[in-house]
Amino acid sequence: MNFNKKQVKFIAAVTGLGVMLMGPGAVFPGQAAAKRLEPIPATVSEPGVQLLPANMQLTDPAAVTEDGTAAAQAAAATSVQPQATASKIFAVPLDQAITAAKPAVYLKDTAMQGLADTLTKVSVVLPGRVAASTSKIDVGPGVANLDYAKVIKWQQNVDAGYERWRLDPLQVARREGKQYGFTDQDTFTIVKRLATSNLARHGEIHVKVTHKGKDYTMILVKPFGGGDAIWTTYKVVGQYKPVPPVENPGKTLFSTTKYDGWSWQQGRYLKDMAFATVVDYNYQLKKDKRIPENVLSKIKNINYDKKVVLFAYLGTAPSGGYGIGIEKVVLNGSKMTVTVRTQSPGRGAAVTMALTQPADYIVLDKAIFSSRGGVDITFVDQNGKVLSKNKLTISHR
């Protein structure tokens, strides 16, 4: 019975055993007999697959369980002698990791499948111990809701000698904690260690983080088994809500406090409320009929060769006491946020009964909008409600 290299590696991946790979002159179709065998480790590390220690040796056929004879016969027929080798214990389903590694699987090769099935049933005798029964591959559950696409890559990096800090729970807490707003000035203390838990069968650690006088708990888990398996953050809990991730605040282009006392007392905004980014007054007046000419005329004399106007129109109000004002403009990369504050009269307020059309605007340099791909402009109210979105692209001729 002959096997190619991919088939041999597949057997190693499925069984968790190292397989003796045929060296130069091995028995491949049309080639001479094997001269020398070299051990290779399993190429797929499986979550939850219990593999054998590096120093474990298979006993002679007489010392193994009833399936040992079949294993020995299969090994003799193929000239492939299985040996144990150390590897990582992962915690995701077997078929998921095999799919990720893309081994060559010949489902119609019944001889190879039989050998793989036989090898998975072999019981091994440890030096100085009685025969242990490992009749089936131990595939255990992983950590629920953990992104194994990421953690497997991290583990592979560590195995290759990179990012070794992932083996130290405190370093993991300090580095990954920055995603939650924690800083190097915070205090990190391990308060609980669990060798196994309902959450993570390979290990769980709780790290108390004192941030600005408040205590939080980072729950770290070990997704895989073994002494050189990584740690990663599962979640953050505490007396208060987790610290939100620190985001780039962007650059403030305009800010005022003159509308601080304003508040909107009604459930809905006026139906003809409108917002505009004006780069040409005459074009805006001709193409956009949402804003009345008498309201838009306030920006008629702007130098649009160099300037852009952000215009906010509350709509036609039934009385006085209404207002709208642009209080902040922030640019973050190619995204601009324009915050407006709105006002409506409270019940019983003394206001004029004449119709009003509140509006406000600010003028910005045109060069601000010259970034490649344009600028996405979002108008929001004081409560963060999105009122309007548009995109401005300045073309250069």
Image (tube, rainbow, N blue to C red):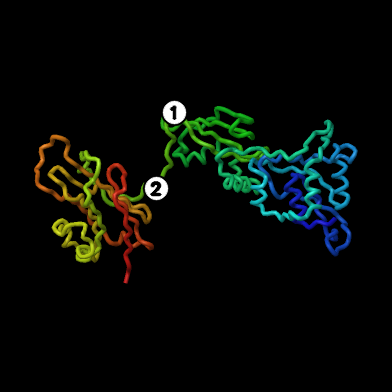
Residue type (three-letter) at the residue carrying disc 2: Asn
The image quarter in which residue 48 lies = top right
Q: Look at the image and tell me in which quarter the C terminus lies.
A: bottom left
Left or right: residue 369 compared with residue 64: left
Q: 136 or 27: which is nearer to us?
A: 136
Q: 125 or 165: which is nearer to us?
A: 125
Left or right: residue 394 compared with residue 131: left
Q: Residue at x 22, y 40 (%)?
A: 266
Residue 186 placed where, x, y %?
46, 34
Residue 306 placed where, x, y %?
24, 64
The residue pinned by badge 2 equals 248
Q: 61 or 162: which is nearer to us?
A: 61
Residue 367 placed where, x, y %?
30, 62
Residue 35 placed where, x, y %?
88, 57
Left or right: residue 339 compared with residue 189: left
Q: Residue at x 66, y 42 (%)?
A: 47
Q: CA distance from mark 1 to mark 2?
A: 26 Å
Q: Which mark is residue 239?
A: 1
